[in-house]
Amino acid sequence: MLTCGVWLTPRRLIAVPADDGAALHGYTAERTDDGRWALLASIEANVGLDVTIVVSQGLQAADTLPRFVARRGMSLLVAPEPLVLAAQRLVCGPRASARALALMLTRLPLCPPLASQLLRFEMQLPLL
């Protein structure tokens, strides 16, 4: 399974794709619309079109990246905050880098008990 975790920092988005858990080259982008679009385009060009993006519920609420993912037709999974915090404590520790946290998100779908807690993001279209 090809997944890519994206972690939000105050200034950037950090993305780390992985194929069956093995980390690939990471990506960073400015928190601008052009940066988000370029980040997703780079991931598609270098990793492939069948990648599933994984974000935290906090990123979903605080950033427009999920809408960009939906507009590009990519799949998006959202990890609930309690799951993210628990995994962060167990796997990364309190001083983990943004890259390590993005990789942690990347690997959540590979663990069946954790994957069952991820939510599939569906963008709501306005009624006409």
Image (cartoon, rainbow, N blue to C red):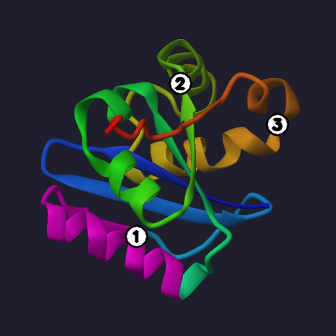
The amino acid pointed to by label 2 is Val
Question: Which residue reaches farthest right?
Answer: 112
Residue ID for mark 3: 111
- The answer to whether residue 97 is above or below residue 4 is above
- Quadrant of the rendering where the C terminus is positioned: top left
Question: Which residue reaches farthest front?
Answer: 128
Label 2 neighbour load within 10 Å: few <14, some 14-19, many 20+: many
User: Looking at the rendered structure, which numbered label has been put on residue 84?
Assistant: 2
- Quadrant of the rendering where the N terminus is positioned: bottom right
User: Is 80 positioned to the left or the right of 117 in the image?
Assistant: left
Residue 40 position within the rendered picture, expressed as x and y whole percent measured from the top left: 40, 70
Mark 3: secondary structure: loop
Residue 105 position within the rendered picture, expressed as x and y whole percent measured from the top left: 57, 42
> How many angstroms separate mark 3 from mark 2 (CA)?
13 Å
Residue 64 position within the rendered picture, expressed as x and y whole percent measured from the top left: 26, 45
Mark 2: secondary structure: helix
- The answer to whether residue 24 is above or below residue 36 is below
| Frontmost residue, 64 versus 71 | 71
User: Looking at the rendered structure, which numbered label has been put on residue 40?
Assistant: 1
Mark 1: secondary structure: helix
The answer to the question of whether label 3 and label 1 lie on touching residues, with beta carbons closer than 8 A, is no
